[in-house]
Image (cartoon, coloured by chain):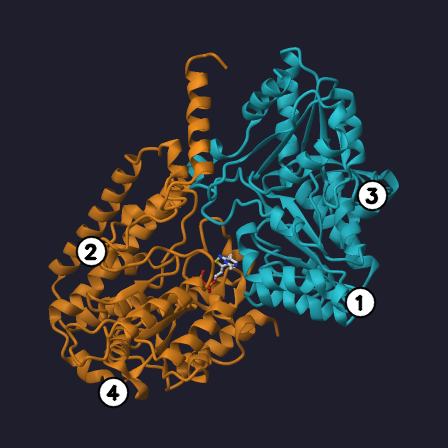
Chain colours: A cyan, B orange
Amino acid sequence: MTAAPGTAAATAAADEAGIENLPISRALNAGMRRALAENDRVLLMGEDIGRLGGVFRVTEGLQAEFGERRVLDTPLAESGIVGTAIGLAMAGFRPVCEIQFDGFVFPAFDQITSQLAKFTNRHEGALQMPVVIRIPYGGHIGAIEHHQESPEAYFTHTPGLRVVSPSTSNDAYWMIQDAIASADPVIFLEPKSKYWQKGEVDTRARALPLHASRLVRRGTDVTLVGHGAMVTTLLQAAALAESEGTSCEVIDLRSLSPVDYGPILDSVRRTGRMVYAQEAPGFTSLGSEVAATVMERAFYALEAPVLRVSGFDAPFPPAKLEGAFLPDADRVLEAVDRVLAY
Amino acid sequence: MTQTENSVQDHASEAADSAVVRVLAPDGSLAPSAAAEPYLEIIESLSDAELEGFYRDMVVIRAFDRQATNLQRQGQLALWPPSLGQEAAQVGSVRAARPQDHIFPSYREHVVARIRGVDVVDIIRVMRGLTHGGWDPTDPRNGNTHIYTLVLGSQTLHATGLAMGLVFDGKCGTGDPERDEAVVVYYGDGASSQGDVHEAMVFAASYNTPEVFFLQNNQWAISVPVATQSRSPLHKRGEGYGMPSIPIDGNDVLASYAVTRVALEEARSGAGPRAIEALTYRMGAHTTSDDPTKYRTSDEELSWVRRDPIARMRAFLEARGASSDFFTDVDAEADAVAEDTRVRTMQLDGIPRNLMFDHVYSEPHPLVDEQRQWLADYEASFEEGTS
Ligand SMILES: Cc1ncc(C[n+]2csc(CCOP(=O)(O)OP(=O)(O)O)c2C)c(N)n1
């Protein structure tokens, strides 16, 4: 039986089989379809998400299936999208907003950081803000300015926001549903260069809760930690390191705020060494925070300082330079060498 | 009725509206609308050379635009946003500007940039991923053309601020048209929903800036029809903010020229900001990444082919007796520009890696300096084979 992946027929088929092989974009689509079907208060809103299905086709077919009042092609204004999502949440809806590209979230910055993040606190709990903001983020797509950024630190720095990023199809499918079910605002960062990466989705049961980090590769010498598209790079680095006799453990952070330190500290207590890798610039970044916390909590287990590999502290460069700007497996290995040389 | 049907209807009736300034009918015949009356004197005073120049501008840039689209398809560019179909709105408005005026484009104003003196290969360099800026707006050769802005609507505030500076420095309203300066800012129907555009209009009206807000309503913001952005004609927005606002047939280069010229003269003279809504059509895809068949009908596209700005101007010039040599010559120039674009694009080199650290700050910064050095050492370690 070969129903198109992510369609209603495929979902029905998958309910029996339980496993579908989907690219991340289709897994997100299937997760949102299920959330829309299960709760009629769930709304999708954003630029070009309806008829076009989004510029990355993540919402393809959902407007046709659920109608123009559930999947809204909004006017072109990010502050408007997030600001009205707040009002819709007050009216009892669960809006899922799409920001078209990372660099276009900033017109909504006030609504996200000063309004959405603080609403529940300001109302002393009388109002909840179950709003999800989906943002395709990160580089590796060779695009022009504002289309390749990693703005996570602005949001992890903002109390009141939960921030997550899936790196596999299974996580994409479950995490989007868990984000929609959350009573709090969730910034949902989608690693856009991995939208076409396929993987198995188990539609019967979630593997992990929303805010858990996950050990994705076992190793004994160095712990590598990262999120989103960087997880692939870390796995490449681990494979290369292995051929040189170094055994790396790899952890996918998954949840950027809160951070689930359990598996990370566990790992570091075994390896004694850690490298954090991220596409975002390093100064006052998520990597800085995780590194500092690990040093505070596992100081006596560490054989070397925690090292960070980051995008440079410069604006994301023109596309022809992204290869030099973004950490690749070699840059991760350079840090692995340094952390081992201590 | 779907949103799209709605928008097409709105605009068909809007175009029929006699408030819209139109000089040439779609078939190229001189058929001024009632609203065009005040502008006819300007149009009658245009020389044959000027009229032919408008046509030449449009044809040449279309050839360049087609070439750029092809270069993207051949993998030479990251992306290309075609100006196809919007030539009349852009040529007319920018030809109405004086050399001392400032131009703020969005990202589809290739026509505008070229006419102001920007080397089109500099636009190519932006879309090839070699630079974020492309050209230096302070270099006189670029005709005070500011660089493209990709975050929709942001440039309307920058334009307004610059225009406020002109007011504060007494660079407008002196009564000397050779010296007075003004600003033209371009934006789209989609961008018109952004808060920045509204705030720009508030500031412009408040400070009485010498500025023309030039909206190219090409009916679509990627897949979203203009009816989603506004339920009343967009030019009415300008009026709401207190500035005279005029809708024009954006596919009529003569209307675009005359109306912008008057608006700019008024703005330069100190009469304050003006808004123009050019009703036009994005005949191509939003960008080379876009597939318009997903959201609009070929009937709609065809209805705008019949209103093609270049065919309209050509018919007008032919009726006036322009020689066939002239048209042949224009086509030859267009071919030459397209070919030159292709050749020079293929010759573009890469960029030095260290460029990403340049101009992050104007003054030295230790973190940037450290990372520049780190990258140089890191790369050298590969060259020496010591890594
Ligand atoms: C703030 C912001 N949000 C979203 C985008 C993505 N985007 C680029 S162009 C575009 C549509 C713009 O439509 P319009 O303003 O009508 O101009 P046109 O492209 O039709 O010339 C969108 C949504 C962006 N560039 N900036």
Asked if A175 appears above or below B237 in the picture, the reply is: above
Question: Which amino acid type is marked by label 1?
Answer: Glu
The percent position of residue B91, horizontal first and vertical second, equals 27, 65
Residue nearest the viewer, comparing B63 with A83: A83
- Ligand 1: does it lie within 8 Å of the C-beta at label 2? no
Q: Are marks 3 and 1 in contact (CB under 8 Å)?
A: no
Q: Which residue is mark 1?
A: A124
Residue nearest the viewer, comparing B360 with B146: B360
Distance CA(mark 2)–CA(mark 4): 34 Å
Q: Which residue is mark 3?
A: A209
Distance CA(mark 4)–CA(mark 1): 61 Å
In the rendered structure, find residue B38 and report the number of the disc placed on it: 4
Q: Are marks 3 and 1 on the same chain?
A: yes
Quarter of the image that includes the C terminus of chain A: top right
Q: Secondary structure at mark 2?
A: helix
Residue A7 shows in the view: no
Q: Are marks 4 and 3 on the same chain?
A: no
Question: Which amino acid type is marked by label 4?
Answer: Pro
Tell me which chain the residue with mark 3 is part of.
A
